Amino acid sequence: MIKEVPPAAEMQEGTVPRHHQLIVTLFGLYARTPGAGIPVATIIRLLQDAGVGPAGVRSSISRLKKRGVLESVTVQGRSGYALSSGMQDTFREGDERIFHPRRAGIEDPWLLATFTVPESQRNIRHKIRSSLVRMGFGSVTPGLWIAPGHLRPSVLSYFENRGMGQYLEFFLADHVGSSDMRANVAQWWDLPALELQYAEFIRLQQPLLERWLDGGQPVADRMARAFVDHLLLLTEWRRLPYLDPGLPVELLSKDWNALEAHDLFSRLHSVLGPLAEEHATAVIDDVP
């Protein structure tokens, strides 16, 4: 176990991810085979170095089970958990967004969305709106939403899998008017807020890359430290590609910092990933 506060957690100050987010990242990285489970004791052991105590782990697992993310399994006679079968497609789609985010071309079509919800089911409206934002849509008007066309497969799958597809209609369209699309996207999406989040990611993670490249990490517990840094890194990063719709670069500011942030994430992932996996595999395989 790492005896000192992990550097990544130290840098994150008051923004350390919630326990359940770390657990989702853990399963997404190391327990993707259908039916493959991790004993509860092993989950606790892996997360203790990230500052999560046993009570926090058990409470978060319980919430994730209720949400249908995890399911109970037996691992070599021990109580454990695995990803629910219904989550496999969600995680595969997430891989593309997180590790290979796509940016639209200026001539690519746009995906338009509109929805109708009966008055008796008004609670679903907020759920649909928040889901559209999560999937990268911008708001043209209160009843019309827009996103780059390449998001079509993941968007359709997302809403169908969550039982909301019946309320939405989607259309592929080209922009044929004379309006300034650069000015339009600045109204439809909150780009300054997204830039701030990318800037914060760069501020927090650039020193971490420099420490690892400079060999500033101690040899002792090197793999365990890489595991914690990588777990925090991926948990912080994975929400950003969903907030970023992947708009054409021609419609963005010249200093759009998403490209720099993605390069930083990729470099850190390549440095930390192999060491982190070696540590996680050793701990997971160490089942009495």
Image (cartoon, rainbow, N blue to C red):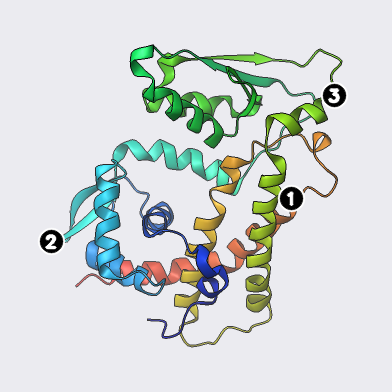
**Few, some or many residues within 10 Å of mark 1 (<14, 14–19, 20+):** few
Q: Which residue is drawn at 46% across and 41% down?
A: 92
> Which of marks 3 and 1 precedes in the sequence?
3
Q: Quadrant of the N terminus?
A: bottom left
Gap between marks 1 and 3, in whole Å?
Answer: 23 Å
The kind of residue tagged 2 is: Gly
Q: Which of 10 and 27 is in front in this view?
A: 10
Residue 11 occupies which quadrant of the picture? bottom right
Q: Which residue is drawn at 85% across and 24% down?
A: 180
Residue 171 occupies which quadrant of the picture? top right
Q: Nearer the viewer, mark 1 or mark 3?
A: 3
The kind of residue tagged 3 is: Asp
The kind of residue tagged 1 is: Leu
**Few, some or many residues within 10 Å of mark 3 (<14, 14–19, 20+):** few
Q: Nearer the viewer, mark 1 or mark 2?
A: 1
Secondary structure of the residue carrying tag 2 is: loop
Q: Name the residue under label 1.
A: 259
Secondary structure of the residue carrying tag 3 is: loop
Q: Answer above or below: position of 105 versus 74.
A: above
Gap between marks 1 and 2, in whole Å?
Answer: 47 Å
The reply to whether residue 275 is in sight is no
Q: Mark 2 points at which residue?
A: 77
Q: In which quarter of the image is the C terminus?
A: bottom left
Secondary structure of the residue carrying tag 1 is: helix
Q: Residue at x 68, y 21 (%)?
A: 110
Q: Mark 3 points at which residue?
A: 180
> Which of marks 3 and 2 precedes in the sequence?
2
